[in-house]
């Protein structure tokens, strides 16, 4: 009985460990090359409902060391969503991406479109909202100042028009991001040699293609334990639910 | 008008067996050279060279005749009455027949007619199995100086040939033949491999040689002494022909083994791999080599299968022959690229083949040892580098950056902390009506355009007075009215003294008001009636004084 109590006590203590401590414990495991344990701890924190770009980044590294490229790419993407301007993160993601087996090569896009995408993904959705709201606030303040007639109103009017255009562009981007994040559910394949079937069950369905871990896919409809995936090049197929981890 | 004619003729009807005959077909008024199947001649003649083509034109009595001539050098194959048959010539869609020509050839058929120079065709065997090598050597024997013209080798139909020796410069050695000293040189040596069983006739080799003709001594002319002889020797062109040879091709003894794929000779088989071990998904080269003497290059390996755990690519075939041997020998190799898909020990069964050894006239079966490839499972990366860009290959070599150890900022997953942002938006939108609300509450136009004008009313009025032209009367009342309009923020400066009185009563004190009204009235009079035109300085002074007083009183 006593032993049981102590075990329960210890267990609860582990559970009540602050998230920070857990995180550092995970880092310790990582440093001692115990990647599996590190992954377990990091995943526990995620299960508890807490996330952070550092956590996802470390989780990605641990998966990478375990040679689970799909999972590591998933974690890096998660981290990048929270902290899009971390150079370590994009570097590691690039290395992990180089190890993806399936290569879907798309034609080069028009450079302006590329530039737009680059700018768009440089800030998180919330950061974009903050930038947008601050510029609106600023515009309103300038408007108020102009109403005092303390300064030359012609100049102020031009500044206001400039800011309004800026605000419009920002909110266009925000709207784009909003639809992108709500309409496109993305996922990463986390297993090798996944057969994509023409329908959501084994049986008479034919295997359309094989897909390997690390590939980013759009997630279409779902059917009891099955997901429809759409590849970047437009190919569609059904794969079992557990083969994808959605972003 | 074409009147086409075809004629055939020769330069001589009588000749010796060693002479060349020039055979010509002339087409008159043809617009192109025709097609002739000259092979019909080859029964009794051999074609030494040709056809050479030649065109000529003639003008006779104003009409043009053109003729095209095709000519061949032919040599008789035997002595006697030989016939050049009538040949069919096709010119465009028309058909013509040439005339038949009969030629008398003097000489004997059997022994070489010329003992000074002749060719032999030597076979190392006259009976051979299918695929067995027969070496054919053409040699030239000579006692006199000759020069050999470039020659063409006859076709060996029914054989696969492998050229063994064909010198640019024929080397001669001394040899005694039946007590006669000759010089002998090899013209051509070829390995023949019969590809189907039957009896074959080897076509003779015909070559053209030029010999120096000994002239009968002429008179003892001082000019034609032996010293000058060398300048005046004549050359004679002769055709030498080797004797025809026959080859009998034997069939293999039955029963023929199933694994026989055509190899005849004597061989050894070996296998090798390029590395001792390999990794999963990493290619390894498996090489099967057949070394030996025989019809290498004429047979394939019997098909053999690798296990299912190996991906296999079609083999690369390679043949290295040893050129300086009379018998065709060398190494044939097949390189298979194998990619093992699972780890463990993969064994490749022995490669076996059967060949026929013509020396002992027996079937022989040979096989290599079996090969075992240890396949190591790699813990690291499993991928192939195909389709990677240079940058990606470079990335593969690198390692990831170290984990982040800084204290994380935690956010609840699934919660969007939008409240602060929404607040910012709300604040911004609430601030928009602030100036309007402010104005309406205070009733005070926060420094509007009119307020600014009101502030500057006095200085504006002063400016106006200053800017008035010296000679013209000062529109004093107008200046005062516009000052009042600016100051009191009125909509119009269309005023008169009575309105001004009404506006300013209670705003400024009565004495000042009366002064102003009087001034306005006096001024009106002076303005319209031109009464006091010498009082300008006074009017200006009085106006400014009045305005300054009003300015002080209106706040």
Image (spheres, coloured by chain):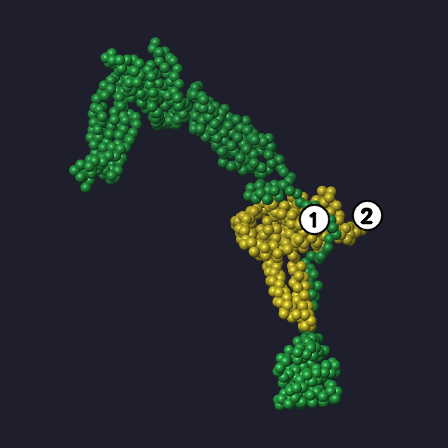
Q: Which is nearer the eye, A171 or B156? A: A171
Say which chain tag 1 marks. A
The colour of chain B is: green
Image spot of residue B336 (x, y percent): 52, 33
Whether residues under marks 1 and 2 lie with C-beta atoms below 8 angstroms apart, the answer is: no
Can I make out residue B363 in this image? no
Say which chain tag 2 marks. A
Who's the residue at 68% across and 58% down the image? B414
Q: Residues within 10 Å of mark 2 (few under 14, many from 20)?
A: few
Image spot of residue B201 (x, y percent): 32, 23
Q: Which is nearer the eye, A24 or B241? A: B241
**Residue positioned most to the top:** B179
Is B146 above or below relative to A154? above
Quadrant of the image containing the C terminus of chain A: bottom right
* CA distance for labels 1 and 2: 35 Å
Q: Is residue A137 left or right of residue B274?
A: right
Q: Which residue is mark 1?
A: A58
Image spot of residue B140 (x, y percent): 35, 18
The colour of chain A is: yellow
> Which element is circle 2 on?
helix
The dot on residue B150 is: none
The dot on residue A3 is: 2
Who's the residue at 67% across and 61% down the image? A130
Who's the residue at 25% across and 13% down the image? B221
Can I make out residue B309 in this image? yes
**Residue positioned most to the right:** A2
Image spot of residue A150 (x, y percent): 69, 71
Q: Is residue B428 left or right of residue B99?
A: right
Q: Which is nearer the eye, B196 or B171? A: B171
Residues beneath discs 1 and 2 located on the same chain: yes
Q: Is residue B53 left or right of residue A185?
A: left
Who's the residue at 28% across and 13% down the image? B225
């Amino acid at each position: 009985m006593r032993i049981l109590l102590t075990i329960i006590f210890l267990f609860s203590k582990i559970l009540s460990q602050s998230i920070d401590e857990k995180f550092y414990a995970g880092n310790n495991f990582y440093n001692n090359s115990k990647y599996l344990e590190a992954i377990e701890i990091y995943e526990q924190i995620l299960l508890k409902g807490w996330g952070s770009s550092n956590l996802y980044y470390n989780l990605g590294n641990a998966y990478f060391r375990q040679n689970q490229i799909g999972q590591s790419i998933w974690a890096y993407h998660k981290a990048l969503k929270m902290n899009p301007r971390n150079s370590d993160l994009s570097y590691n993601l690039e290395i992990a991406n180089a190890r993806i087996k399936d290569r879907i090569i798309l034609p080069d896009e028009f450079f302006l479109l590329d530039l737009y995408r680059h700018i768009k993904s440089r800030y998180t959705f919330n950061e974009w909202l903050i930038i947008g709201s601050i510029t609106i606030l600023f515009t309103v303040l300038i408007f108020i100042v102009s109403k005092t007639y303390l300064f030359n109103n012609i100049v102020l009017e031009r500044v206001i028009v400039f800011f309004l255009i800026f605000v419009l562009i920002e909110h266009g981007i925000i709207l784009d991001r909003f639809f992108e994040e709500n309409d496109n559910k993305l996922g990463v394949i986390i297993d090798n040699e996944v057969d994509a079937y023409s329908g959501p069950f084994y049986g008479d369905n034919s295997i359309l293609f094989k897909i390997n871990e690390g590939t980013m896919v759009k997630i279409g409809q779902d059917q009891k334990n099955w997901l429809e995936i759409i590849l970047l090049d437009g190919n569609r197929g059904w794969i079992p639910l557990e083969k994808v981890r959605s972003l | 008008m074409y009147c086409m004619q075809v004629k055939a003729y020769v330069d001589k009807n009588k000749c010796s067996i060693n002479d060349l005959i020039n055979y010509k077909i002339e087409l008159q008024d043809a617009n192109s050279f025709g097609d002739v199947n000259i092979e019909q001649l080859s029964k009794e003649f051999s074609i030494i060279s040709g056809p050479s083509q030649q065109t000529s034109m003639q003008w006779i009595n104003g009409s043009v005749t053109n003729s095209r001539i095709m000519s061949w050098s032919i040599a008789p194959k035997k002595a006697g009455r030989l016939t050049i048959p009538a040949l069919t010539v096709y010119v465009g869609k028309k058909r013509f027949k040439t005339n038949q020509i009969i030629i008398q050839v003097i000489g004997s058929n059997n022994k070489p007619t010329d003992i000074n120079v002749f060719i032999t065709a030597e076979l190392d065997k006259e009976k051979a199995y299918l695929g067995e090598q027969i070496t054919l050597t053409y040699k030239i024997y000579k006692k006199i100086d000759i020069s050999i013209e470039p020659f063409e080798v006859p076709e060996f139909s029914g054989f696969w040939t492998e050229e063994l020796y064909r010198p640019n410069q024929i080397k001669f050695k001394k040899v005694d033949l039946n007590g006669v000293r000759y010089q002998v040189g090899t013209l051509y040596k070829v390995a023949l491999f019969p590809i189907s069983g039957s009896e074959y006739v080897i076509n003779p080799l015909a070559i053209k040689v030029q010999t120096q003709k000994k002239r009968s001594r002429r008179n003892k002319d001082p000019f034609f002494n032996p010293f000058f002889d060398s300048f005046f020797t004549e050359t004679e062109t002769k055709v030498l022909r080797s004797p025809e040879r026959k080859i009998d091709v034997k069939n293999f003894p039955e029963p023929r083994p199933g694994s026989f794929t055509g190899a005849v000779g004597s061989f050894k088989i070996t296998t090798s791999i390029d590395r001792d071990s390999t990794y999963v998904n990493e290619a390894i080269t498996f090489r099967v080599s057949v070394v030996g003497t025989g019809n290498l290059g004429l047979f394939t390996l019997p098909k053999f299968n690798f296990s299912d755990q190996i991906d296999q690519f079609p083999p690369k075939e390679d043949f290295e022959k040893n050129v300086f041997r009379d018998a065709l020998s060398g190494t044939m190799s097949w390189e298979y690229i194998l990619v093992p898909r699972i780890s463990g020990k993969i064994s490749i069964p022995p490669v076996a083949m059967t060949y026929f050894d013509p020396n002992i006239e027996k079937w022989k079966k040979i096989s290599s040892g079996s090969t075992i490839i240890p396949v190591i499972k790699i813990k690291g990366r499993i991928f192939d580098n195909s389709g990677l860009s240079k940058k990606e290959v470079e990335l593969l070599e690198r390692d990831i950056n170290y984990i982040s150890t800084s204290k994380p900022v935690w956010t609840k997953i699934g919660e969007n902390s939008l409240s602060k942002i929404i607040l910012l938006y709300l604040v911004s939108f609430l601030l928009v009506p602030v100036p309007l609300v402010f104005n309406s509450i205070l009733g005070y136009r926060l420094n509007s355009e009119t307020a600014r004008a009101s502030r500057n009313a006095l200085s504006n009025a002063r400016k106006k007075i200053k800017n008035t032209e010296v000679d013209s009367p000062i529109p004093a009342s107008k200046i005062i009215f516009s000052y009042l309009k600016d100051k009191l923020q009125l909509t119009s400066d269309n005023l008169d003294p009575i309105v001004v009185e009404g506006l300013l009563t209670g705003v400024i004190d009565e004495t000042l008001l009366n002064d102003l009204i009087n001034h306005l009235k006096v001024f009106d009079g002076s303005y319209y009636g031109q009464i006091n035109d010498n009082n300008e300085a006074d009017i200006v002074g009085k106006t400014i004084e009045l305005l300054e007083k009003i300015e002080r009183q209106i706040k």
